[in-house]
Image (cartoon, helix red, strand yellow):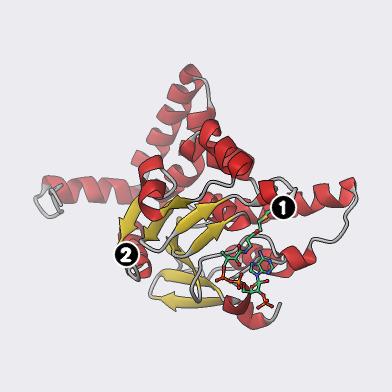
Amino acid sequence: MTKKDLQLEMHGVVAVIRLCRPAKRNALGDALILALRDQLENLPAETRAAVLCGEGEHFCAGLDLSELQERDAGQGLHHSRMWHAALERVQYGPVPVIAALHGAVVGGGLELASACHIRVADASTFYALPEGSRGIFVGGGGAVRIPRLIGAARMTDMMLTGRVYNAEDGERIGLAQYLVPAGQAFGKAMELAKRVADNAPLTNYALMHALPRIAEQPADQGFFTEALMAAVAQSAPEAKERVKAFLDGKAAKVKKD
Ligand code: 1HE
C-alpha cells in the first residue's frame, strides 16, 4: 500500500475517508485495513461525522486476494481479529460514519459497509459475498453484522449460491438505508453527514455506542440501559439549550420531506 491508498479530506467538520486503490477496485490488504483503523483513531479533533467512499468504478472488492497466502489456523485467526479491530473502530469510533456506495460492495467491502452507521447506495451498486465460491468464509465481522441487517437466511443464500443483489433489492432488504440515482451517493452522504454533525455529540454517542448494545440486551436490561442513557443525554447543557430553543419557537419543527 502507498500513503495515497487511503485519503482524508476535511469538509468543515465532516471527514471524508476515501479508499484510493481504483486499479485494484479498492481491495483491502492488511496495510490498508490497518491504515483505516489508524485513521479512525486519529481524526482531527473538530470531526463530527465521517463519509467513507471509494475512488473509481467500485466502492470495494473486499479482501485483497493477492495477499491470501497459505496461513495456518493461528495466523488466520489473528488476521480476522485484525479486521475486527479495524471495523470496530468504524462502528464504535469517535463519530458516525456514512458509507457512500457504488459499484461492487463485495466480500470484505460489504463487511466494511456493514460496520458503518448509514449506507447510501447509488443505482450502480451491487452486493455479493463471493467468499463461498473462493473457498473461504467471512472474517471481517460479516457473520455478526450482516445477519443483523438482512437476516441469517438471506446471508446464507448469498454465500451458498453466490447471489448478487442489485441496488434496488439491496435497499429493499436492508443493506442500504438510502437509494439514489447513479453518481449521487457521495452528495447524499455528505448532506446526511452535515445533518448528523449538527446533532448534540452526546446523542450521536448514544446512538453509536448505546443503541446497538441495548438492541442485544434482554428487554428488561435494555429498558434499564435506555433509561440510564436517556438520563445522561438529557442532563447535558446542550440538550437543555436545544429543548428551550424549541419551546421558545426558535428551533425547527419536524416537517414532512
Ligand atoms: C483484485 C480484487 C481483490 C479486483 N483482490 N485484486 N473479493 C472478491 O472475490 C471479488 C473479486 N473481484 C471481482 O469480482 C471484480 O474485480 C469486481 C466485480 C470487484 C470488479 O470487476 P472489474 O471488471 O471492474 O475489475 P477486474 O478487471 O476484475 O479487476 C481489476 C484489477 O483489480 C485486476 O487486477 P489486474 O492486475 O489484472 O488489473 C484484479 O485482479 C484486481 N482485483 N478485486 C485482489 N479482491 C475479512 S475476510 C473478507 C473476505 C473477502 O473479502 S473474499 C472476497 C474477495
Circle 2: residue type: Lys
Residue 89 vs residue 232: left or right? right
Element under disc 2: helix
Answer yes or no: do the residues labelled 1 and 2 have beta carbons within 8 Å? no
- Asked if one can make out residue 117 in the rendered structure from this viewpoint, the answer is no
Q: Which mark is drawn over residue 188? A: 2
State the image quarter where residue 49 is shown: bottom left
Number of other residues with Cα within 10 Å of mark 2, as a class: few under 14, some 14 to 19, many 20 or more = some
Quadrant containing the N terminus in the rendered view: bottom right
Location of residue 198 in the rendering, given as x and y in whole percent from the top left corner: 31, 59
Confirm or reject: label 2 Cβ below 8 Å from ligand 1. no
- Asked if one can make out residue 8 in the rendered structure from this viewpoint, the answer is yes
Of labels 1 and 2, earlier in sequence is 1
The answer for how far apart the CA atoms under marks 1 and 2 are is 34 Å
Location of residue 53 in the rendering, given as x and y in whole percent from the top left corner: 48, 68
Identified at 46% across, 71% down, the residue is: 16
Q: Which mark is drawn over residue 167? A: none
Residue 76 vs residue 171: left or right? right
Q: Say above or below: 155 vs 60.
A: above
State the image quarter where residue 12 is shown: bottom left
Element under disc 1: helix
Q: Say above or below: 30 vs 155.
A: below
Number of other residues with Cα within 10 Å of mark 1, as a class: few under 14, some 14 to 19, many 20 or more = few
Residue 152 vs residue 125: left or right? right
Location of residue 46 in the rendering, given as x and y in whole percent from the top left corner: 45, 69
Circle 1: residue type: Arg
Q: Which mark is drawn over residue 134? A: 1
Q: Of the residues tagged 1 and 2, which is closer to the observer? A: 1
Confirm or reject: label 1 Cβ below 8 Å from ligand 1. yes
Identified at 35% across, 57% down, the residue is: 196
